[in-house]
Image (cartoon, grey):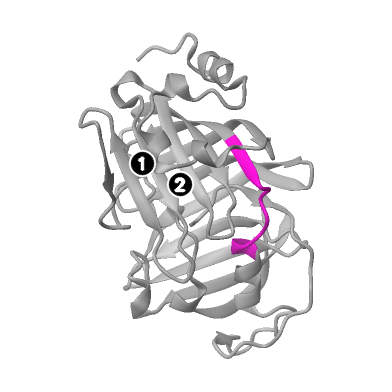
Amino acid sequence: MKRIFLLAWLCCPTLALADATVPAGATAPAEEPKAVIERSESRPIGNDSVSMLMVTLTDQAGVRRQRGLLWYHLASQQGDLDLQKFFYPRSIRNIATFNEEVRDAEDLQYLFLPAASRVRRVSSKHQTWVGSDLIYEDLQKLNLEDWTYRYVEQASEDGFAVHVIDCVAKPSSNSAYAKRRYYIRADGSYFPSRIDFFDSAGTLIKQVRRSDVRAYGDALYERLVQVKDFRNGHQTELERRWVQVNVGLPAALVSVRQMEKSIEHFAYPAEIQRVVDEATNGMVE
């Protein structure tokens, strides 16, 4: 599952990998590209977390729409669980999505539509995620064996030294993208500041940028995620307005069954309803 949550990670020695290459004329990297991606993807993010995010969708004409959601995350030995529950606007209130990480296989993903009063399995990870510029694949964790890796260069991004690494999709990946280019901080945090997405023709089709990074204990969480789709001129901005880490989230609250419950029944942690009310106070639909 691809996560928006970000944490620090300590450096450790790496081994050379057969599918990691360095372009001609480039300086050999201090770390192997696959190892850097693996650390970035598997960075610890706490045992659990709860976030409140406001999402702004902007079309090519500059027309904006806002959405609000709660994001519950729970780490598990079998695989991480993530539940997103929308509370704003009224037209999508109580829609929910759920991602269950499956080790060495495709994640299981579900969508709950309150109008139909049922949960359904998401049939394709290429589908758009609730009308945004993200797709369900963007919520999944990268399966490392479905990609090959190439170290491009060491560069600077937002004032930080970064490893620039290309991940090229193997046919087994069934990915919507032919290549992803990662910009991962070289300061030991393995924070992915930026990801560029390319199609099979080598055209840049989408870009994700993460900024305004803040520490919560030893955890680093970005406050702002910007997603640009260059094919249609659309943009999605996710602003994390509230987050708590390691709150002791019960497993029952991050489940398919929980998807079907009304937002009013999301009462953990205790102040979550106050957070939702404050976020929507004064907003006009």
10 Å crowding of disc 1: few (<14), some (14-19), many (20+) = some
Mark 2 residue element:
strand
Q: Is residue 131 visible?
A: no
Q: Residue at x 46, y 22 (%)?
A: 265
User: Pointers 2 and 1 in contact (CB under 8 A)?
Assistant: yes
Residue 17's place in the image compared with 245, above or below, is below
Residue that badge 2 annotates: 227
Mark 1 residue element:
loop
Q: Nearer the viewer, residue 110 or 77?
A: 77
Q: Which residues are magenta?
A: 40-50
> Residue 25 placed where, x, y %?
63, 88
Q: Nearer the viewer, residue 75 or 212?
A: 75
Residue that badge 1 annotates: 132
Q: Is residue 178 visible?
A: yes
Q: Residue at x 60, y 77 (%)?
A: 34
Q: Would residue 233 be counted in the magenta stretch?
A: no
Amino acid type, label 2: Val
- Residue at the farthest left position: 116
Q: CA distance from mark 2 to mark 1?
A: 9 Å
> Residue 186 placed where, x, y %?
73, 65
> Residue 216 placed where, x, y %?
75, 39
Q: Would residue 46 be counted in the magenta stretch?
A: yes
10 Å crowding of disc 2: few (<14), some (14-19), many (20+) = many
Residue 279 tag number: none
Give the quarter of the image for residue 183.
bottom right
Question: Which of the image's four quarters has the C terminus?
Answer: top left
Q: Nearer the viewer, residue 106 or 221?
A: 106
Amino acid type, label 1: Ser
Question: Closer to the observer: label 2 or label 1?
Answer: 1
Residue 258's place in the image compared with 98, above or below, is above
| Sooner in the amino-acid sequence: mark 2 or mark 1 | 1
